[in-house]
Amino acid sequence: MNRTRFTSVALNRIASLHPGSPPAAIPASLTEGRSPKPRQLAVFSLAALSLTVSACGSSSGSASADNGGATASKAATTTTTTQPVALSASTPSWQLRNPLSRMVLLPTTNNELVILGGLTASDTSASGIFQLNPANGSLTALGALPAAVHDAAGAVIGSNYLVMGGGSVNTVASVEAAPSKGGNGKVIGNLPQPRSDLSAVSVNGDTVIVGGYDGSTADTSVLSTVDGVNYKTISTLKVPVRYAALAAVGGSVYVFGGMGVGGTASGQPLSSVQKIDISTGVTTVVGSLPKPLEGGMAFVLNGHIYLAGGDTGTGSHQVSNAAVWLYQPGSGFTQKATLPLAVSNAGVAVSGGVAWIVGGEHNGKATAVVQTISDKSAAHS
C-alpha cells in the first residue's frame, strides 16, 4: 500500500436494483498499492457505499489471455480430486453499478456473498458491509466497519466476518469483526504489527495470513489464528511479497506471485510459487507462474486449484491478465478459460459451487464488472 493522506467525502446512499438502467456515475476509489507514485486517497467514512447494481448482457470469455483485465481474501481450501476439468467463465446479467476493488469478499452460509470495505474508482477507502445476492445482484446493507479500509485480508471465523489489517490513513494492524447476522463491526484486536496488501486462507479450521508489508518493509511471517484475536507465527516466506494470491489444498498453502518488496524486484510482479507446509512450518519455492503476476485471484473448485487474472506490470505499465490457469502441484499450469474482462485486485469467493470474481481493476482502473467461473464437469461427476 502506498501511504498517502486521505480527505473526507460525503456519504452515498445504497441504491436499489434497476434492471436495464445504464450505470450511474461512479463514486471514487482506487487506492493503495501498485503505483510507484502515491495516489491521493479519500476515506469513504461510513457504511453507505453506493454499490448498486445494473443489468448487463451476459457474455462468455473471448479475450486473449494476454489482454488487459481484474484481494482480501484471495483463497480457498479443499481436497484434490482427479475429475476432468471443463471450465466456463462468463458474466451474470447484472453488475455493480459503481466500480470497486481491493475489498474483502466472503461467502455466506446461504450461498450469498458479503462485501466489506474496498476502494472506489476515485481512490476512496470504503467502510460499508453489504450482502450480495448472486441470483439477481441485489444488495442489502448490513452495517459499517469501524474504520474504512482496503487491501485487507478477510476470513469467516465463527459467527463473524473478519477484516484484518489493510490500508486506511496509514497501514493498520487492527482486526475488525462484523456479525454475520448483520450490524456494525468492531475492533476485536490487532495483528502483531501493521500490515497491508496481505492475503488469508482457511486451513483445517485455522486462518492463515501470508504476505504484505508495513508501508515500507516486507512482513514475511506466516501467521495462524483460530479466533482473530491471538496470532502465532508458523512459518516464514522464502520470497517477500505483497498482493499474492493464496489457495490451500489439504495441509498446504500455495502462494502465487505477488509484488516484490525490497531488493532488485521491489515493486515488480513476481513469478514464484511458494508452498507452505502447515504441519512442518517449512516454506519452499516449488515452481514459477507462466508469467510474473501480482494481484491475482486464486480459488478451489471441485478439488482443483485455479489462478485467474492479475497484473503483469506496475504503475502506468499495468496490464491485466485474462487467463484462468489450472495449477497442479508437481505438474504446473494449464490455461483452462479466459475471463471476459482481464482484472486484478478483485474480490474472489466460491459460493454455490461457483467462483465469483467481483469488481477489481482493469489495467489499473477500477471496474464494476462481475464474473463467474464454473467447472462444468462437476455437474456430470
Image (cartoon, rainbow, N blue to C red):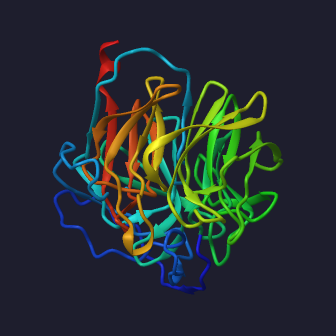
Q: Report the residue that reaches farthest toward the front.
A: 264
Residue 298 % position (x, y): 48, 42
Taking the spot 65% from the left edge, 50% from the top edge, the residue there is 239
Taking the spot 33% from the left edge, 32% from the top edge, the residue there is 374
Q: Foreground residue, 299 or 307?
A: 307
Taking the spot 31% from the left edge, 54% from the top edge, the residue there is 342
Residue 156 % position (x, y): 63, 42
Q: Is residue 100 left or right of residue 162?
A: left
**Residue 131 appears in the picture as rendered:** no
Residue 248 % position (x, y): 59, 33
Above-or-below relation of 169 to 366: below
**Residue 96 appears in the picture as rendered:** yes
Q: Is residue 192 left or right of residue 276?
A: right
Residue 343 % position (x, y): 36, 56
Q: Quadrant of residue 353?
A: top left
Above-or-below relation of 72 to 79: below
If the image is split into quadrants, where does the C terminus sit? top left
